[in-house]
Amino acid sequence: MKKYISYLITFILIGASFNLAQDSSTVFTFTPQKPKPGDQLTISFNPPKTSLKKEKNVDVIIYSVKESIIICEEYPMFLSETGWSYKYLIADTVWCLGIKFSSEKTVVDDNGKNFAVLLYENDDNFLLGTKAAYAFLCNAAAANVKTDTKFVYSYFNEEFKNSPQLIRYYLQPYTRCIKAIENVKADEMIRNILQDLESEKEPDEKMLNTIAFTYLIALRDQTKYDYYNNLVRKKYPLGYFSQSAAFIEINKMSSTKIEELERAISKFIADFGEKNSWLILLRGKLLKAYCEQKMYSKAENFLTAYKNEFNNITGISLVNSAAKAVYDNQDQLSLARKLIEFSLTSLKGYKSGRDDFRGLTKAQIEEQLNRYRLETQYTAGLIYEKTDGANKALDFVQEAYSFGKPTDDLKILHAKLLLELKQNVDEVLKITEEMLSTGKTSDAIIDLNREAFKLVYGSEEVYEKYFSGFKGKFLENLTHDIKKEMIDKSAPEFSLTDLDGKKISLSDYKGKIVILDFWATWCGPCKASFPLMKEAIQKYTDSEKVKFLFVDTFERVNNKIENAKKFIAENNYPFQVLLDVDSKAANDYGVVSIPTKIFIDKNGNQRFISVGFEKEKILDEIDILIKLLEN
């Protein structure tokens, strides 16, 4: 990896070292101070300066890492006169440990990171891979840490400077760091790494998979991805990549073509067997398809035949989705009840285990389970309102609130049931007012709010004035938030081709407000935003001061031009689309996820960056920014 090592040598490491010789006044200490795999580690916790200082029970959370595998364990600590302690046997295969301390919902860590236990090969040398493993842990969503990309990048580089062969284990998180930090030279660095990996003799299936997805995700190189996709499927026809590719193709199939779907799943089983992680998802798709197409006898028999396979956290959610599909058809609600009762019963009897939630703490597992519980209670509320009435449905809805922050759908159902029962109408006003004040103005919310207002105040005469106050407050808060996040930096020039083959440059619109919308045809949130973006364009269609440019980037198909043309034509969008075929414009603007909208003022400076899509805010956000940039 000579080409790549030259980059590492010139990289100035960011200060990120550990003082392993800790004194007794620190929160966390351990012995031996240079632990090795196989050692018994004594972990000590001194909580007086932490939020756990008065707790009677403290657990130690231990993340052990080998390569890119994280295992989470939790143990009760023992209290003595010197503080809390726990003796932990380090497995022979472990590369590093990350430590946290907790009591119920309170967690103590190292300023957003895990306390680190780097391991040693001997008294003079760190264990090979220990720093890279800790960097990986600091970047892992499962470890519930605040990611400091510069810190993570510095630790990866410190390890890879002397051991570039370890990059293979951390290729994707490492390339994400490179993309975030190295800017202009990032793609060249990543390509050099990949070329070195490609030159190895007989790379295994996992390595070929990683190379393929890195080409696709980091470099947007569809040709290389397709090459490795075909190679790994040919070389490992029964392997994970082949299974996942087959799953993706089946998952794309229409739920209206039941027989085709059944045959495809039968072939999947014949090719790959019954024991694979994708099969439960395919069976869930088929169960939902039966329900959507009103093939209710098949759905009921299918659930009966595979109830054991569905009796896990993934299956429970899939059955819940099928129950919702029957409810949406508004017939055969007895089957909807049978399906939702399966999910409710299975959830109550579910024993959370590490196999379903690898790498998560007990608190994180419970949080995940509560999301499933809340979702299932909501569906039960919908169904039981139709079968047993509002009182029974309200029981499910109120119980759902005990499982965490309610969704908007749950709030709407709650308000609807209270109105139906003429119970606690003040609570309906409170629920709907909170939603309206954050810009949520769907017809359902407005209708509930209007009805509650009439019942509380006995009149609709002043309702419009009352309602407009929420919109005004929302716009005031949104304007305040936007002003806080505004920036002022030069917008990079670009020259891109539109769908008619015309060259378009940013400088063509000097003196105008330019809104760049970075998107792709595969991006769900991008496509969800487009009907509203169409409204925005129509609102400013006569304005000579505003220009919308839709930059098609990060595409994953070979014929990107025809792909974009077809999409725009099929949806009849009046967009001026620019083709960022090599993703250079996106990279120049630092775009890492889409949709991303960049607002450029009349002087050619970037003033605001909006990432993602929030239906309730998008049009107001555009209006506010245009007014601010016009001044």
Image (cartoon, helix red, strand yellow):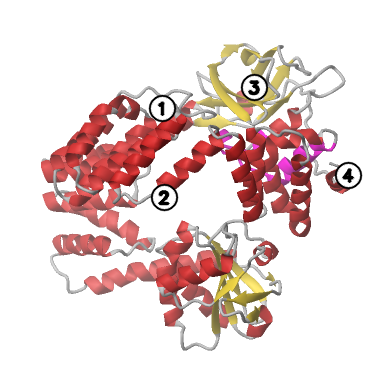
Q: Is residue 364 above or below residue 231?
A: above
| Image location of residue 346, percent across then percent down | 29, 27
- Kind of residue sitting beneath label 3: Asn
Give the residue drawn at x 74%, y 27%: 130
Q: Which of the marked residues, 4 or 2, is nearer the chain's N terminus?
A: 4
Q: Which of the marked residues, 1 or 3, is nearer the chain's N terminus?
A: 3
Q: Is residue 159 magenta?
A: yes
Q: Quadrant of the C terminus?
A: bottom right
- Kind of residue sitting beneath label 1: Glu
Q: Which of the marked residues, 4 or 1, is nearer the chain's N terminus?
A: 4
Which residue is identified by label 1?
Answer: 274
Q: Quadrant of residue 600?
A: bottom right
The residues bearing labels 1 and 3 have C-alpha atoms spaced at a distance of: 50 Å
| Image location of residue 310, percent across then percent down | 33, 30
- Kind of residue sitting beneath label 2: Lys
Would residue 21 be found to the left or right of residue 326 on screen? right
